[in-house]
Structure formats: C-alpha cells, structure tokens
Amino acid sequence: MRELPSNEAEVQESIRFYAGRIKRDPGDFNAQNRLADYHLQRLRETNNAADLEAATRAARISMATVPAERNLSGLIVLAQAEQFAHDFSAARDLGLQLVRIVPNKDYSYEILVDALLEL
C-alpha cells in the first residue's frame, strides 16, 4: 500500500534498520510492519522466497503483539504476504476482517476483491 524505495541499497538498509529496532524492542509492532513492507518490496524486485518468509513472520509477530483493530498496517501487510504466498483463502479472510473493521476504506475492498478474483 505504501510506496517504498526501489533502490536496492535503500531497501537493504531499511531492512537492517528495522531488524535492529526489533532486536532492541521485540514488541515494536510498527517496526515489524515496516520490516514486512520492505521484505515484500524486495520480494517484488528479486523474487526471493526468503523475503516472503521474513515478511510473513514479521507480519504475524506484529498481529500477535497488537490486535487487528489497532493494527491495520499489520493486517494489511499480512494479507499482502498471504497473497504473495498464493494463500488466497487466508487473504480473503483477512480482507473480510478489514472490511468489517474499516468499511469506509477502499483498500479493504481492494484486498478482498484481489483475493476473491484469485479464488
């Protein structure tokens, strides 16, 4: 959802930065969300499966730390990771959850519709 730098060095530096923040404070759910974002960005650019695993792990930790109602960024990045993993049923369920929480936001429906189209 967010525009991230496509410069490989910037993405790598951002991954290191957020990984360092998480090491110092494992409960920093915002850092987990940003880390997941950057791993998904790198996945788009390199198609490296390790980035999908890292993004999914960070998003799940974020969601375990703070519930979806107060962690929309975590819910969104987890849904995106599930779509990249081709787990469209999980992405659909997360999209439905987003629609319930924020029905007035287009991105909720974008995530849901993308998953439904794939199914």
Image: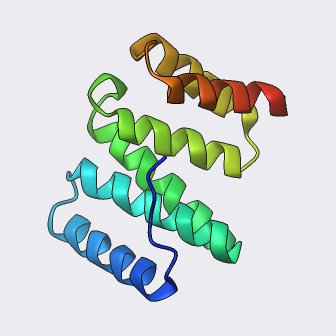
106 left or right of 111 in image = left
In the rendered view, would you say 84 is above or below 14?
Answer: above
Residue 57 vs residue 86, the one in the foreground:
86
Q: Position of residue 11 (x, y in %)?
A: 44, 77
Q: Residue furthest bottom?
A: 9
Q: Residue at coordinates 77% horizontally, 24% vertically from top-left?
A: 116
Seen at 59% across and 22% down, the residue is: 109
Residue 113: quadrant of the picture? top right
What is the x, y in percent for residue 19? Answer: 31, 72
- In the displayed structure, would residue 29 be above or below residue 93? below
Observer-nearest of 24 and 107: 107
Q: Examine the image and state in which quarter residue 117 appears.
A: top right
Identified at 61% across, 62% down, the residue is 52
- Residue 12 sits in quarter: bottom left
Q: Residue furthest left?
A: 24
In the image, taking residue 25 as reference, residue 80 lies left or right, namely right
Residue, x 61% and y 31% (percent of image)?
Answer: 111
Q: Which percent across, then down, holds residue 7?
A: 49, 82
Render colour scheme: rainbow
Q: Nearer the viewer, residue 41 or 51?
A: 41
Q: Position of residue 41 (x, y in %)?
A: 54, 65
Location of the C terminus (image quadrant): top right
User: Is 92 on the left or on the right of 25, as rendered?
Assistant: right
Above or below for 98 versus 77: above
Q: Is residue 102 above or below residue 117?
A: above
